[in-house]
Amino acid sequence: MKKLFKILLPTILVIIWNSPDSSGQPGRHSFISPEVKADRTVTFRFLAPNAKEVKLSSEFLAEPLSMTKDSVGLWTIITDPVKPDIYPYFFIVDGIQVSDPNNTYLFPNERFKRSIVEIPGDPPLLSEVQKVPHGYVTYMYYKSKSLDLIRPVLIYTPPDYNNNNEKYPVLYLIHGMTDTEETWFKVGRVNVILDNMIAQGMAKPMIIVMPYANPLPALKENNGKIDMNVLNTDYFSKDLINDVIPFIQSNYRVYTDSFNRAIAGFSLGGRQTLAAGLGNPDKFAWVCAFSPAIFSNELENNFKNSYASAGALNKNLKLLWVSCGKDDGLYNASVEFTTLLENKSIRHKTFFSEGGHTWMNSRLFISEISKLLFQD
Amino acid sequence: MKKLFKILLPTILVIIWNSPDSSGQPGRHSFISPEVKADRTVTFRFLAPNAKEVKLSSEFLAEPLSMTKDSVGLWTIITDPVKPDIYPYFFIVDGIQVSDPNNTYLFPNERFKRSIVEIPGDPPLLSEVQKVPHGYVTYMYYKSKSLDLIRPVLIYTPPDYNNNNEKYPVLYLIHGMTDTEETWFKVGRVNVILDNMIAQGMAKPMIIVMPYANPLPALKENNGKIDMNVLNTDYFSKDLINDVIPFIQSNYRVYTDSFNRAIAGFSLGGRQTLAAGLGNPDKFAWVCAFSPAIFSNELENNFKNSYASAGALNKNLKLLWVSCGKDDGLYNASVEFTTLLENKSIRHKTFFSEGGHTWMNSRLFISEISKLLFQD
């Protein structure tokens, strides 16, 4: 049997691999994109024989770069060496944004389609898959009574979870606006970061729960009469407290005291983190807002109850963390917020990094707080 | 605290929600696409103010349909009522294929980017998420010694798996050419189909393992000197037998006898199924090829060892199944293959459906074999 399938069928192979798809456009072709070289230059390729202009746009570029077309209509660009990290990118084809058809790594998002390119570091970054014990990411559904919906949730379990009977602390980790429950996994690489940090003794083994924090479209479809304001954190807070947490506690071996429960989130998820976290200081001892979607003109009003309960916060919280990139449009509001916390004597930590409102910063922030979480 | 975040910020909201992204193209906008109505018509929308022509292409259409542009550059089409099912689709924007930026459901694939639209049935289809107990899908990494690579694999565990100490049978389920380890999950909806079939008593609870069956690009990057022929099933067979199966057996409560081990696959995965399954009749008692990528001119040669071992196959196999759509370009080869099996007195079942080389048929085939697998 060993030679059963060894006979090559090069003609058939070539026909299938290069055959045009149903639209008549070649959909299967054998070039590689993106191609990351050892010198950290990257070659991007996009087949578009009829396009007049193709550009590459990415968060590692200050502005989109024009690509060059060859005689068969393959557009190419080779970049300068890129700083090791993971970047979203897309092509702009005659003004239309297109993800890279040849790249399986996509940015999960409700509103745009972008591809992901990874530039390895030397030594490897925390976000690179390395030869260490790996945890798992599990896709589950739960019944949300608060929302009257079946909702998706992703759960990271650390490497040793299946090999013992111990209980674990839990981090509830929230995505940004227009992201989905998959974004912290696929773009944030939180499972890979934690695998590496746990292997190096940099973080305590923990379970990470990634809910889908935007129930508005599903609620609208189900009911019709709902408040579609995305800055309203009530629906998600109720779902998290009344449904997600009990679901996790009945399906996983987890501690249920507040010391062993953390919440963190990026952008709109940072706002949701502050609402659910500061709103329930008896439930979360660790509250971490990454580049939170908060605004100068609302800080006094919307957080006044938090300021009033400074004593309770200082007593119950092990960590209130606010981080933001210095080029982020939300940076000033974060600075103002932490100044207010300072003035009200609410204990907190700040972490202001280079860069903007990006997932490069999100990964940096999760790495930083993972060193602190659940440490005595 | 209840009213903490209730103050609306409509101005800020509107600015963020409608703000152009980094390319200057409006990336966040509030229209819905696709919008599936109760009458099963679907409205598709795509914003492209500068495009000259936008078409909708989908496997529920005989040919692409032209969309109509309004005064702000939003292209729209409302379809006729669509037969309940799940369909891939994409837009053709001035000749370029584009997935739907507003739809989070994407078709995982190495070579093209398509979106997915679901038309609910009444009563609901097996592929629809219903209010039944749900199993889990887990993303794992394993170390493949055969390939010298860290590889991804997805595992479906049925609803009761975490609530008992029983062992389960295992189906190894392989995707098609240019698909990924995610395609049976995201497009095949195999977890949802099995949840529903188990709830209705139509299928035995089983674990389903979905490996990534195309190691060629990673091997090429790692080594350089490899046979890049996609029809060569050797790499994958070795990985499956020597690495995937032992990994599953050491991480899950599964039976390890051949009666409790099945293999199935679609397209190139159907070919890999026949190679690994018929090549190891001591290991798999259930071998199911869906629309297999086999060809008329190779059947006698490439399967002659199988024919020679008809006795062993008939003795060991509980089910050898070949299915194909009658409009599939691979249909004739499937018919010829089953005729040869007939002539060689190798016991098998055939299932020839309407339609073509589609995932609508893949879902039908997995539903059909799930009724048979692991039944005495």
Image (cartoon, coloured by chain):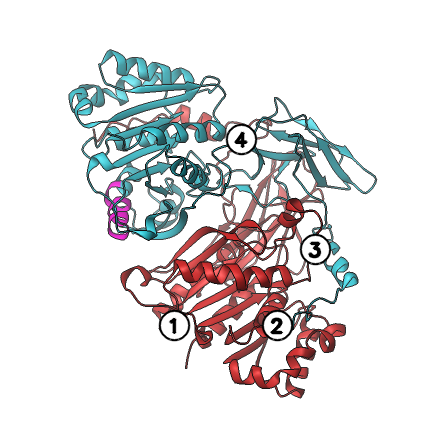
Chain colours: A red, B cyan
Dot 2 lies on which element? Answer: strand
Q: Residues within 10 Å of mark 3 (few under 14, many from 20)?
A: few
Q: Residue B30 at x, y = what percent?
A: 72, 49
How far is the residue under mark 4 from the one under mark 2? Answer: 49 Å
Give the residue drawn at x 47%, y 33%: B126
Q: Which mark is residue B21?
A: 3
Q: Is residue A247 above or below residue B158?
A: below
Prevailing SS of the magenta stretch: helix
Q: Quadrant of residue B201?
A: top left
Q: Residues within 10 Å of mark 1 (few under 14, many from 20)?
A: some
Which is closer to the viewer, label 1 or label 3?
1
According to the image, label 2 marks what residue?
A324
Q: The C terminus of chain A is located in which quarter?
A: bottom left
Which is closer to the viewer, label 1 or label 4?
4
Q: Earlier in the sequence, mark 3 or mark 4?
A: 3
> To which chain does the residue with label 4 belong?
B
Q: Amino acid at mark 1?
A: Lys
According to the image, label 1 marks what residue?
A204
Is B249 magenta? The answer is yes
Q: Amino acid at mark 4?
A: Pro
> To which chain does the residue with label 2 belong?
A
